[in-house]
Amino acid sequence: MEPAFVAVDLGATSGRVMLGHVRDGSVTLRQVRRFATGPRDRPDGGLRWDVGEMHAEILTGLCEAAPERPVSIGIDSWAVDYGLIGPDGELDGDVRCHRDPRTDGMAERLAELVDDETLYRITGLQYLPFNTIYQLLAEPPERLVDKTMLLLPDLLAYQLTGAIGAEVTNASTTALLDATTRRWSTELVGRVGLPPGLLPALRYPGDPIGTTENGTPVVAVASHDTASAVAAVPAARPGIGYVSCGTWSLAGLRLSAPVLTERARAANFTNEAGLDGTVRFLRNTMGLWLLSESLRAWREAGLDITLNRVLSEAMREPAFGAVVDANDPTFLPPGDMPARIGRYCRDTGQPVPDTPPAVVRTILESLAIAHAASLHTAASLADEPLTTVHVVGGGSLNEPLCRFTADACGLPVVAGPVEASALGNVLVQARAAGVLGDADFASAAAPHARYEPTDDRAGWREAARRVGLALAEEAP
């Protein structure tokens, strides 16, 4: 029987339990269970994740995968969100969603304790208003006493095994990890006033975590889903950029050392831990969230909208009718996305897209511009070449977005694999089990399409200037 591995791959809208079979140095993936994961409004206010339901769905998926006798299980998910484990070993309260407004004002509060330059020098982390450090500042201090913080994949692994730890790729997104030493920063912990014992011991991809009740090993993978996705990209070659595109778009390079310069801080680039001591030097951008929230709003309004049809219709809309800054904070919370896009365009003196195809064209072109600006700026800041872009994740199936990204970048785009996070998850497990070697990583990912850029560089540069971004020749 071919060795089988279970990848629990959680996104911010849906989760999957995937089976990965390894044969002759290649991996085939099969979905055994899919379930919704989106945050929920509670009557008392705020957005929460239903971790209990996620755990139940994972257990069901593991039961469905059990006949394959998996060698091990690995879990990856989005970053920054956490649960608190009390002295009794139980989860204390809810797991709050990073889109919850409780972190409003926390950046200003942190700045009173740690200046921005020092924070970046230590962590190398992009400013995002929901980073874990801001969430912890928003907690009542007494709630953190005698607790252990577990980021979501570590929390779910704890529920399966009873073992406590913090996997380093996800820990690097907290703004509490030293980007150079890859250890918790005692300086930041002290300045913020976090209680002793809150941060658990670190572990690394490939480390054993424990076993489930039926004896199946659980192995640490690159538990930040983007770290797993990048592990599935042949990014070790010079000139390769990547966009891990799903609810969020994360665009950048894989480097051997962090870039902690003032220019990198000013450009809001992050240095997150990757597999095998590498650095994911990237910028986080709101991705297909803009599209999924728009689709939800139209359907709630009673419109008969399908994704494939509206994408096709969007391609017939005029180019560059309107563009938005995909990172504008107005687009972060759930809500009526088409209305917010309309207000942004009105406020910036642009034509307001007033049909679903026009809104979708605006979203796709705006995301492509954000991808290109991030990639070219990353190459400049890291003094690295950029010759090809790999788009992985769900966005790799969005043909218009891939075409526009190639055009905006002025570079070929290689699309796929779609399930990059699950693939990277399985690759790490298979290597830990001795089934695959390092050389198998680059050959395991099977792209499904390639897009060559058109020559309309002037049109893309002008559209980018409308939202204060620079492309290619104009990149800093």
Image (cartoon, rainbow, N blue to C red):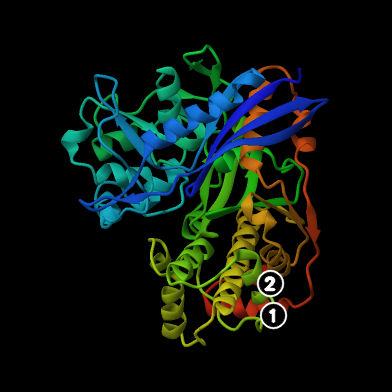
Asked if residue 384 can be seen in this view, the reply is yes
Q: Which residue is at a point 77% across and 43% down the rendered structure image?
A: 237
Q: Residue at x 75, y 51 (%)?
A: 239
Q: How many marks?
A: 2
The residue lying furthest to the top in this view is 215
C-alpha span from label 1 to label 2: 7 Å
Q: Which label number is shown at residue 316?
A: 1
**Does residue 187 appear left or right of residue 412 in this picture?**
left
* Residue matched to label 2: 312
- Circle 1: residue type: Arg
Q: Quadrant of residue 411?
A: bottom right
Q: Position of residue 314 (x, y in %)?
A: 64, 75
Nearer-the-camera pick, 343 or 261: 343
| Mark 1 and mark 2 residues within 8 Å of each other at the beta carbon | yes
Q: Residue furthest left?
A: 142
Residue visible at 76% across and 47% down in the picture: 238
How far across and down, in percent of the image, does residue 326 sit? Answer: 50, 67
